[in-house]
Image (cartoon, rainbow, N blue to C red):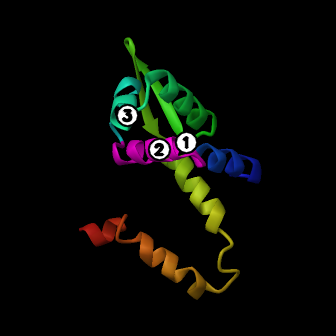
Amino acid sequence: MDTEEAIRALAGLAQDTRLETFKLLVKLEPEGLPAGEVARQMDVPQNTMSTHLGILARAGLVRSERRSRTILYRADLDRLRAMMLFLVKDCCEGRPELCAPLIADLIPCCPPEEVLQ
């Protein structure tokens, strides 16, 4: 991810409804959610949600897939990971103790595979 892509992704999240929508879609991975159901769960009119989902899609944070007459939306976790790595890639400047607290905070959310077994 380059700076321009990171700015687009962060700008896409820089609004309450879009941020909460993205968090909802992350929780529902990998199944995703139809656009109408996203609007219903977020308590937002469908046309307004369509605009928000379009902004998130252009930011590269969500993907859409047509299934018959339904459009299913999913969070792009690879893009989220790329954005997070872009933000913290040089956080420690060769001093890993500076990033250790951040890594420790993330592990309870997403433990590595070997911890799960």
Residue at 51% across, 37% down:
62
**Mark 2 and mark 3 residues within 8 Å of each other at the beta carbon:** no
Q: Residue at x 66, y 46 (%)?
A: 11
Q: Which of 110 and 26 is in front in this view?
A: 26
Q: Mark 3 falls on what kind of element?
A: loop
Location of residue 48 with respect to 60 vertically, above or below: above
Between the C-alphas of marks 1 and 3, the distance is 21 Å
Q: Do the residues labelled 1 and 3 touch (CB within 8 Å)?
A: no
- Residue 45, by quadrant, is top left
Q: Nearer the viewer, residue 57 or 14?
A: 14
Q: Are marks 1 and 2 in contact (CB under 8 Å)?
A: yes
For marks 2 and 3, give the one nearer the viewer.
3
The residue stretch that appears in magenta? 13-29
Label located before the other in sequence (1 or 3): 3
* Residue at the left extreme, as displayed: 117
Tag of residue 61: 1
Q: How far apart are marks 2 and 3 (CA)?
A: 14 Å
- Mark 1 or 3: in front is 3
Under tag 1, what secondary structure? loop
Q: At label 1, which amino acid type do we have? A: Leu
Whether 112 is among the magenta residues is no
Residue 110, given in percent of the width and then of the height, sits at 37, 64
Of callouts 2 and 3, which one flags the residue occurring earlier in the amino acid sequence? 2
Which quadrant holds residue 35? top left
Q: Which residue is drawn at 33% across and 36% down?
A: 31
Q: Which amino acid does label 2 sit on?
A: Phe
Of badges 1 and 2, nearer the viewer stands 2
Would residue 66 appear left or right of 100 to someone viewing this image?
left
Label disc, if present, on residue 22 of the rendered structure: 2
**Mark toward the start of the polypeptide (1 vs 2):** 2
Task: State which quadrant residue 15 falls in.
Answer: top right
Q: Residue 43 carries which label?
A: 3
